[in-house]
Amino acid sequence: GMNFGLLTLLLQLTAFLAAFKGKLKLTIALAAFLAYTDIYLMALMVPLMILHCRKGGNMTSFVIKSLAMMAGLWLTSDWIIWMNWKVYSERAFSFVSSVYLSKLRLDSLRPNSGLQWYLFTQVFPEFKNLLKITMQMTLFSFWPATSIKFRKDPLFIALVLVGSQAILKAYPSSTDYLLFFTLLTIQCKYFEYTRVLLIALFVSAGVFLFKFQIWRYWIELPGFNANFYYIFTLIWNCTLIVILLDIVSAYNKFQLFRDNPLLEKERASIKLFQK
């Protein structure tokens, strides 16, 4: 429910803070618990590991810390599963189906704030099984690609991973959106290189305010046209895609101008001339 979602959001933010402060044990415990509650939260282990281990100085220290953290995550996850077995006995591993397999198989395609249910049930119902595999492969392929591309900025890795999950997950929640916009505010140094971010944020804010009201009308009022909710779902996810692409483009521009001071001077002179 909402209370558990807020707790998950708080634990995710605490995990990032613990990794930034160098609290290895707390980071491992929080990361293992988050992975236990949601398979997609395993993606956050990579930025947490980089955020904690990059303070070592040289590559040898980084590798040792990374291996230690991976071992700690493995042991902590095993301990959580063992405790689950001790408490629930014969139903100990029922969470595997409910937490992991059901989300991978997409057993339920009930309307939600995500994009997958709409594509599967309203647009391409005859290709539903193919799209399930394709969307899941696309989502999981973001993990290694993003971690390699943005390895120098672990918080930006987390932003891209959380944003892609909020768009592509079958069952996104308000926690995904809140964490995405929270991480987005941290990347304020890239905002001056964006093009349509401000417009997309205003549109997303307006859609967010009306979306849940439209949902309530659809559920409670007989005969209410469901196409209104479909339209708001598409607009909401399109604005998230625009925001994510714009901030990634801004990151690339920032890196380009930082590595090429002459281009930065030329850009500054053009902005001054335009004023």
Image: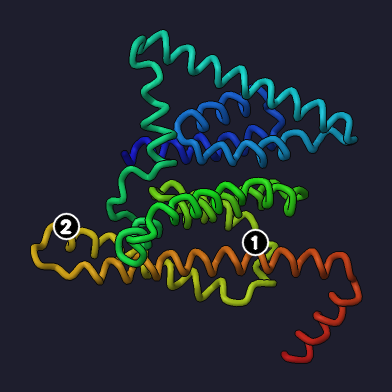
Would you identify the image quadrant in which residue 19 lies? top right
Q: Is residue 93 left or right of residue 225?
A: right
Amino acid type of the residue that numbered disc 1 sits on in the rendered structure: Cys
SS class, disc 2: helix
Amino acid type of the residue that numbered disc 2 sits on in the rendered structure: Ile
Marks 1 and 2, the one that precedes in the sequence: 1
Q: Name the residue that disc number 1 marks.
A: 188
Q: Position of residue 122 (x, y in %)?
A: 30, 64
Q: Is residue 42 left or right of residue 66?
A: left
Would you identify the image quadrant in which residue 191 lies? bottom right
Q: CB atoms at circles 1 and 2 under 8 Å apart?
A: no
Distance from disc 1 to disc 2, alpha carbons, whole Å, reads 38 Å
Q: Nearer the viewer, mark 1 or mark 2?
A: 2
Which quadrant, please, contains the C terminus? Answer: bottom right
Mark 1: few/some/many CA within 10 Å (<14, 14-19, 20+): few
Residue 182 seen in this snapshot: no
Q: Position of residue 224 (x, y in %)?
A: 14, 68
The vertical placement of 257 against 172, above or below, is below
- Identify the mark at residue 139; answer none if there is no mark: none
Q: Nearer the viewer, residue 53 or 75?
A: 75
Q: Nearer the viewer, residue 100 or 220?
A: 100
Q: Is residue 89 left or right of residue 201?
A: left
Mark 2: few/some/many CA within 10 Å (<14, 14-19, 20+): few
Q: Position of residue 147 (x, y in %)?
A: 70, 47
Residue 17 seen in this snapshot: yes
- Identify the mark at residue 219; answer none if there is no mark: 2
